[in-house]
Image: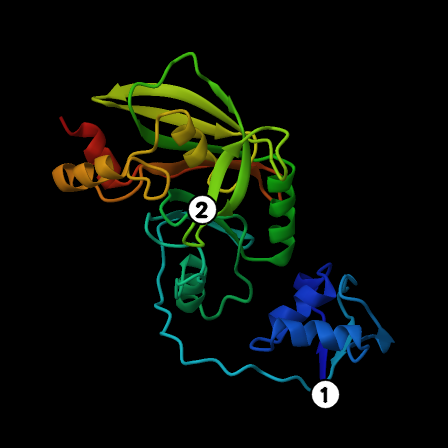
Amino acid sequence: MQRITVDEESAGQRLDNFLLRHLKGVPKTHVYRVIRSGEVRVNKGRASADTRVAAGDEIRVPPVRVAEKPAAAAVPAREFPILFEDEHLLAIAKPAGVAVHGGSGVSSGVIEQLRRARPDARFLELVHRLDKETSGVLLLAKKRSALTALQDQFRARDTGKNYLALVVGAWPKKLKVLDLALHKGTDAAGERHVRVVAADAPDARRSITIVRSVRAVGPYSLLEIGLKTGRTHQIRVHLAHSGHPIVGDPKYGDFALNKTVAREKRFARMFLHAVELAFDHPASGERITLHAPLPPECETLLAAP
């Protein structure tokens, strides 16, 4: 029998999420079963999965079974370029080609590598996500209170996110707003795939992307992208559907062109970069605006004849 006391940083969490975090290796189904059966007690009383725990609560947990897992590859310890850090949050410049977290065939990502590099960190969680192929500003919380405050801002669209993308062809300067509904599903191989659908289609989600043409770069266009919504693969799908896929996009791009660019320009990544992120600091309320400079390989491609 375990007795766990809820600390200040965990206050406000759902009971199921609190237990899943503390009972590492215990199957998710087993955690929910012991909650439903009443074997988990909060301050000696029964509680449901959606009960919010408070600082000082005593949670009694019955003996639980830990799932056996095959030996996993060691997670490398890695730090990333820091854009901002204080006691509440950490902002890094994520490189392209690194997932933000492990899973779906990825042994480890930014969050696991940072935790390994910072073994004394009591709390470190992703505030939001970037695609594996996307580089740029990535925000992490170092306190639970900071995590919830920042995630509330993201949900309320109180943050400002801007991207730079290099796309195929000449972007029409008058085309500034892409208001296209998206549907998230899977392709023939079972991989996640997003497509544009009619606004009244089942499970359609309205998605709005703001586009500003920065300049022509030979046969390409450099665009500044703003988001009014934050759907999965939104920028990539909207631009591809408009006839101007992102250079190097391995899922929605021009695959033949991608090979040519990789061979002739030695550019083997997707040109989508989260260049700016603005938000209110979770403790002081100060408006913070962070910038991640374009990676050298992107600058080199823009300067190529």
At horizontal 70% and vertical 67% (from top left) the residue drawn is 16
- Residue beneath disc 1: 1
Neighbourhood count class around disc 1 (C-alpha, 10 Å): few under 14, some 14–19, many 20 upward: few
The residue closer to the viewer here, 129 or 115, is 129
- Residue beneath disc 2: 130
Q: Is residue 15 left or right of residue 81?
A: right
At horizontal 64% and vertical 47% (from top left) the residue drawn is 149
Task: Identify the element where label 1 is drawn.
Answer: loop
Q: Position of residue 293 (x, y in %)?
A: 33, 37
Q: What kind of residue is marked 1? A: Met
Q: Is residue 250 left or right of residue 14?
A: left
The residue closer to the viewer here, 239 or 282, is 239
Above or below, 278 relative to 57: above
Image quadrant holding the C terminus, namely top left
Q: Position of residue 236 (x, y in %)?
A: 41, 36
At horizontal 59% and vertical 41% (from top left) the residue drawn is 154
The residue closer to the viewer here, 219 or 145, is 219
Neighbourhood count class around disc 2 (C-alpha, 10 Å): few under 14, some 14–19, many 20 upward: many
Given contact means CB atoms under 8 Å apart, are the residues at marks 2 and 1 in contact? no
Gap between marks 2 and 1 measured at Cα: 40 Å
* Mark 2 or mark 1, earlier in chain: 1
Q: Position of residue 271 (x, y in %)?
A: 31, 37
Image quadrant holding the N terminus, namely bottom right
